[in-house]
Image (cartoon, rainbow, N blue to C red):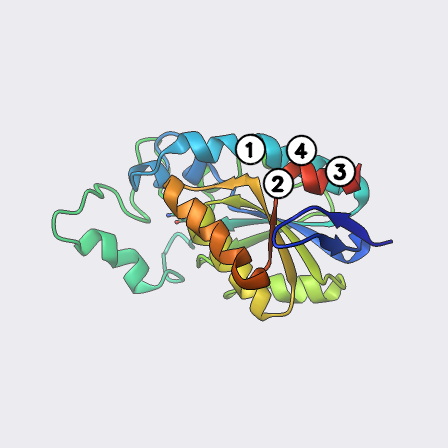
Amino acid sequence: MILSAAAKPYAFSFDPAKTALLLIDFQRDFLEDGGFGEIQGGNLVAVQASIGPASAVLKLARRAGLTVVHTREGHDPTLRDCPTPKLTRQANAPDSKHTVVIGGTGPRGSRLLVRGEHMHDLIDQLKPIQGEFLIDKPGKGAFYATELHQILVNAAVSHLIIVGVTTECCVTTTLREANDRGFECVLVSDATDGYIAEFKHVALEMITFSEGLFGYVCNSGSILAPLE
Ligand code: TIU
């Protein structure tokens, strides 16, 4: 059965049996007060507004039997899997506003972006259930140094519906990685957001530029309609 969702640059066609919903980094560290994102200077209002639409897409994706994959960005407590520049760039910047960097203890008492810490975990509204995949990733892209590609190949997935935070960072990097690996991707515009409105706007424009340079963009209403 092939479904069709209104999208830019044109309709996104997908077979639910070959489609995965990919939820990128809905972690407390990116969405809640005192997390890594807020310490970076991120505005949390927009990212928090993406939770509702993402939850609605997840609910119908589950009902339609899509493969569901959740990701979390973070590191081993020793930080040995953290690329040195990622760790040191903020710490070494002259006049850095980063009083706490990756691995340091944030105002909520969690070490920032460290696996096993409360703030590293997914928000309560978007937790995996049995049968869903949870990928821990050290990078911005969800394919780098993870089992994601093999999971998708094993599940015979060819199409990805992508939601998550932040649009300009981990979401866009993952979508580009997926496009290079031959997956047809649609990003759900109101189920993703970032810390700078202008960055989100340009990120979405770049995806659909030139008949879909990297893929498709639609809103949650458009992707929910065929799944109803
Ligand atoms: N900084 C920023 O916008 N994002 C990240 O560091 N990670 C994700 O996007 N998940």
Q: Residue at x 36, y 34 (%)?
A: 43
Q: Amino acid at mark 2?
A: Asn
Q: Write down the residue under mark 3.
A: 225
Q: Is residue 20 above or below residue 123?
A: below
Residue 42 placement, left or right of 140: left
Q: Write down the residue under mark 1.
A: 51
Circles 3 and 2, Cβ within 8 Å, touching? The answer is no
Front position in the image: 107 or 47: 47
Q: Write down the residue under mark 4.
A: 56
Q: Amino acid at mark 3?
A: Ala
Quadrant showing the C terminus: top right
Quarter of the view holding residue 14: bottom right
Q: Is residue 145 above or below residue 119?
A: below
Q: Amino acid at mark 1?
A: Ile
Query: How far is mark 1 from mark 3, CA to CA?
Result: 19 Å
Quarter of the view holding residue 215: bottom right
Q: Write down the residue under mark 2.
A: 219
**Tag 2 or tag 4, which sits nearer the N-term?**
4
